[in-house]
């Protein structure tokens, strides 16, 4: 048994000693069987959250109504979820109320894909009533039960299918894919937050090209914000070899592929409910990318963009032009490092200095003059030195 599970064994044992069942389940067991790295282990149990609270002194309620509770144990936190069934679905969404049950089998049955419906007990024994191991061996995504029914219960599972393609490079089993192609419209019932979460995992998976192609083939894009009639743009995205791009960079590449200009990108990103900070970053990278695609970096652009943004821009430009990424990144970093200042606060003069020199109160002239000095320093017209700047200003305009 690997370390992540071994460390969590006392949790299973404590629950079992109290007379309940407990297993490792879900993504952690799947990733372990795939020999991938595991971040968190998920635990499922026949004990209710209240019963778990009696067993462990330190717990945090995170989603009691869904049967989930966090247990703090030896410096780690563990998510423990009570076996539940979700038999009554409303409007193609996951159910509002869940029913706690005592059967592992029923809990595994409500899970989305066979590879995610495998449990492991405290001895490392695998419990796999839906043949998830076979699916993993054959790199296949297959719903537990009839795909059509499972997608109607919770349409988000269709997006989960293609994001798992992106992360795991699996194929989608035939019946599952047929159901995927004919049920996309049900995604209208899913909250945008849940869709965004899966879409972002799709954008950052290693196998995103294939996942994006499947998204087009299944027409799921027609039910996603801003992508409704964008087939050719999305195809363009699927043709880029976007190896090392990170999440915000992928959003930028998506907008670029769709032909959405930076000035028009805000409403697209807002429809996906990205955080303000992420939207700002994406918009800034896109704006500088547009400039970079028509000309080389100027000192002022490099300064205004900042180091992180300029490197992102360069990476995306490399992807668009199918160039090697690493070489250019280092060059941009060297150029950025050689800027005389990195921020206005590093200027050797302040607004107060200027007011004293001019014997005038502040006003619009002050900002204009500071802009001028900033540019002068960046373009090496004057050294970033208080006296040198004063002389330079006098020589430009003796008043
Ligand atoms: P990741 O590694 O990205 O976290 P995951 O499979 O663990 O992938 P989670 O969203 O953390 O995904 O869900 C944990 C488990 O809960 C899944 O493995 C699956 O068994 C079950 N599950 C999650 N979402 C659904 C859903 N919409 N319908 C049915 N079962 C689900
Ligand atoms: Mg998980």
Image: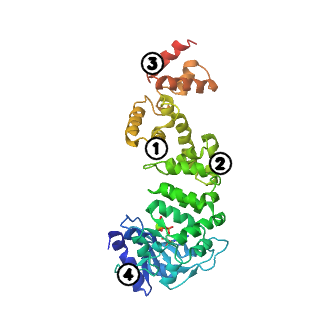
- Mark 2, residue position: 267
Of the image marks 3 and 1, the number of the one nearer the N terminus: 1
- Spatial separation of the CA atoms under disc 3 and disc 1: 43 Å
Say few, some or many: other residues with alpha carbon within 10 Å of mark 4 (under 14 / 14 to 19 / 20 or more). Answer: some
Of the image marks 4 and 2, the number of the one nearer the N terminus: 4
Image quadrant holding the C terminus, namely: top right
- Mark 4, residue position: 13
Of the image marks 2 and 3, the number of the one nearer the N terminus: 2
Residue 276, visible in the rendered structure: no
Residue depicted at 60% across the width and 73% down the height:
148
Of the image marks 2 and 1, the number of the one nearer the N terminus: 2
Q: Nearer the viewer, residue 61 or 277?
A: 277
- Spatial separation of the CA atoms under disc 2 and disc 1: 25 Å
Residue depicted at 52% across the width and 83% down the height:
106
Secondary structure under tag 2 reads: helix
Place of residue 141 in the rendered image (x, y in percent of width and height, measured from the top left)? 48, 69
Total number of numbered discs in the rendering: 4
Residue 202 appears left or right of 368? left
Of the image marks 3 and 4, the number of the one nearer the N terminus: 4
- Mark 1, residue position: 319
Marks 3 and 4 close (CB-CB < 8 Å): no
Residue 29 appears left or right of 50? left
Colour mapping: rainbow
Q: Is 59 rendered above or below residue 363?
A: below
- Spatial separation of the CA atoms under disc 1 and disc 4: 50 Å
Marks 1 and 4 close (CB-CB < 8 Å): no
Of the image marks 1 and 4, the number of the one nearer the N terminus: 4
- Mark 3, residue position: 388
Image quadrant holding the N terminus, namely: bottom left
Residue depicted at 44% across the width and 63% down the height:
168
């Amino acid at each position: 048994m690997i370390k992540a599970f071994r460390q969590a064994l006392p949790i299973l044992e404590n629950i079992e000693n109290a007379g309940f069942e407990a297993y490792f389940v879900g993504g952690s067991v799947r990733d372990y069987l795939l020999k991938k790295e595991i971040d968190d282990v998920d635990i499922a149990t026949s004990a209710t959250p209240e019963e778990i609270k009696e067993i462990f002194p330190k717990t945090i309620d995170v989603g009691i109504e869904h049967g989930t509770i966090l247990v703090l144990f030896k410096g780690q936190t563990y998510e423990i979820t009570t076996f539940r069934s979700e038999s009554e679905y409303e409007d193609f969404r996951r159910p509002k109320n869940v029913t706690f049950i005592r059967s592992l089998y029923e809990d595994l049955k409500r899970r989305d894909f066979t590879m995610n419906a495998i449990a492991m007990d405290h001895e490392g024994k695998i419990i796999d009533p839906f043949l998830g191991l076979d699916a993993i061996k054959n790199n296949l995504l297959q719903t537990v039960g009839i795909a059509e029914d499972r997608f109607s219960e919770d349409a988000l599972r269709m997006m989960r299918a293609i994001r798992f393609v992106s992360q795991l490079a699996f194929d989608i089993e035939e019946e599952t894919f047929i159901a995927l192609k004919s049920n996309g419209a049900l995604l209208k019932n899913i909250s945008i937050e849940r869709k965004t979460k899966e879409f972002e995992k799709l954008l950052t998976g290693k196998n995103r090209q294939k996942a994006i192609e499947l998204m087009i083939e299944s027409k799921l894009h027609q039910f996603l914000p801003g992508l409704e009639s964008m087939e050719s743009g999305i195809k363009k995205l699927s043709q880029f070899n976007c190896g090392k791009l990170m999440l915000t960079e992928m959003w930028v590449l998506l907008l670029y592929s769709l032909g959405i200009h930076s000035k028009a990108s805000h409403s697209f990103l807002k429809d996906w409910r990205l955080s303000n900070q992420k939207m700002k970053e994406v918009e800034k990278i896109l704006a500088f990318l547009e400039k970079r695609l028509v000309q080389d970096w100027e000192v002022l652009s490099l300064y205004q963009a900042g180091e992180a943004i300029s490197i992102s821009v360069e990476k995306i430009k490399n992807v668009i032009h199918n160039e090697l990424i690493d070489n250019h990144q280092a060059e941009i970093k060297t150029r950025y490092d050689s800027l005389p200042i990195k921020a206005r606060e590093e200027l050797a003069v302040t607004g107060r200095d200027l007011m004293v020199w001019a014997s005038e109160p502040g006003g619009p002239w002050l900002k204009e003059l500071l802009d001028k000095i900033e540019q002068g320093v960046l373009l090496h017209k004057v050294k970033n030195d208080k006296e040198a700047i004063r002389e330079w200003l006098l020589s430009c305009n003796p008043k």
